[in-house]
């Protein structure tokens, strides 16, 4: 399905981004790896090449999604290098581990700059090229936190709710232009997301949550994401029973969900 297609993945230096890059490369795609940490991107590229990808088909492009000027240049670099962008996977993001009362407004703003405005900005830059071609696919890693709010994640949940709303609305706008939009809602996935999450003062949390440590294997998560994309699912829910159940409780039994999450210990 993705043989010789160009796939751009942000947040590709670890976690879901890295694992999804492996899936696309194995499917024959030409892959652009973006994140802030270039050495880690080079490590991911080396792993992809070692697994059978052609070196010429993997482009490392270090990028900070809060730098809009840099993103404009990056889009042109990708188009000049590969000729087109068939699939944009917005996966860059950070989480949070702090109570609202302890969280500085600067920290809330950083969460939104990275998790929301960064995804919107890059999408807006890529979208005209897809519209001009009459085809393309845009995906975003949202979260179950974009469906249900939990303690010590006020900013993260708010950001992921915003992501879900934006990309659901975008889907409605661009369907007639031949462009697909997929929202991906992972639950607890075993990555380093809690280690690099922000505390209230903006510093790193630096610890692994028990729920994250015991979460779904990231490679299994990536396979489920790829399966959903290939089946054309507009929204892909990935996670264990509790996370999946919370989505349905939020829709049909919200009071019950609110009681459950109020009692949960997540950190």
Image (cartoon, helix red, strand yellow):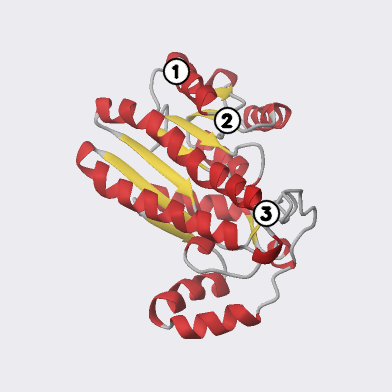
Q: Percent x, y for residue 194?
A: 71, 56
Q: Which of marks 3 and 1 is nearer the N terminus?
A: 1
Q: Which of marks 2 and 1 is nearer the N terminus?
A: 2
Closest to the observer, 267 or 46: 267
Q: Tag count in the figure?
A: 3
Label 2 and label 1: CA atoms lie apart by 15 Å
Residue 124 as seen in the image, left or right of residue 36 = left
Residue 11 as seen in the image, left or right of residue 68 = right
Q: Is mark 1 on a helix, strand or loop?
A: helix
Closest to the observer, 220 or 34: 34
Residue at image coords 32%, 46%? 170
Quickly name the residue at label 3: 104
Residue 203 in the image: above or below residue 51? below
Residue at image coords 55%, 34%? 65
Contact? badges 3 and 2 (CB < 8 Å): no
- Foreground disc of the pair 3, 2: 3
Quickly name the residue at label 1: 76
Closest to the observer, 255 or 107: 107
Q: What element carries label 3?
A: loop
Q: Percent x, y for residue 171?
A: 30, 48
- Foreground disc of the pair 2, 1: 1
Residue 258 as seen in the image, left or right of residue 198 = left
Q: Is residue 86 visible to us here?
A: no
**Pointer 1 local density, CA inside 10 Å: few below 14, some 14–19, many at least 20:** some
Residue 170 in the image: above or below residue 36? below
Q: Look at the image and tell me in which quarter the C terminus lies.
A: bottom right
Quickly name the residue at label 2: 33
């Amino acid at each position: 399905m993705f043989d010789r297609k160009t796939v751009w993945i942000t947040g590709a230096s670890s976690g879901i981004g890295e694992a999804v890059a492996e899936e696309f490369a194995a499917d024959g795609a030409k892959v652009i790896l973006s994140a802030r940490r270039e050495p880690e991107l080079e490590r991911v590229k080396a792993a992809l090449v070692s697994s059978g990808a052609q070196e010429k088909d993997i482009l490392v492009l270090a990028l900070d999604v809060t730098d809009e000027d840099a993103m404009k240049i990056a889009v042109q670099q990708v188009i000049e290098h590969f000729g087109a962008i068939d699939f944009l996977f917005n996966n860059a993001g950070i989480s949070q581990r702090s109570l609202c009362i302890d969280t500085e407004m600067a920290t809330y703003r950083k969460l939104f700059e990275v998790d929301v405005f960064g995804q919107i900005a890059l999408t807006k830059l890529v979208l005209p090229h897809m519209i001009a071609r009459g085809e393309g696919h845009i995906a975003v890693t949202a979260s179950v936190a974009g469906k249900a709010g939990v303690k010590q994640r006020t900013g993260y949940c708010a950001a992921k709710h915003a992501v879900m709303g934006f990309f659901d609305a975008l889907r409605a706008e661009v369907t007639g232009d031949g462009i697909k939009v997929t929202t991906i809602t992972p639950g607890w996935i075993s990555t380093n997301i809690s280690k690099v999450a922000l505390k209230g003062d903006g510093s790193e949390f630096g610890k692994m949550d028990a729920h994250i440590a015991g979460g779904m294997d990231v490679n299994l998560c990536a396979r489920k994401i790829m399966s959903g994309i290939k089946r054309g699912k507009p929204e892909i829910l990935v996670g264990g029973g509790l996370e999946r159940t919370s989505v349905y409780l939020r829709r049909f039994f919200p009071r019950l969900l609110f009681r459950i999450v109020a009692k949960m210990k997540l950190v």
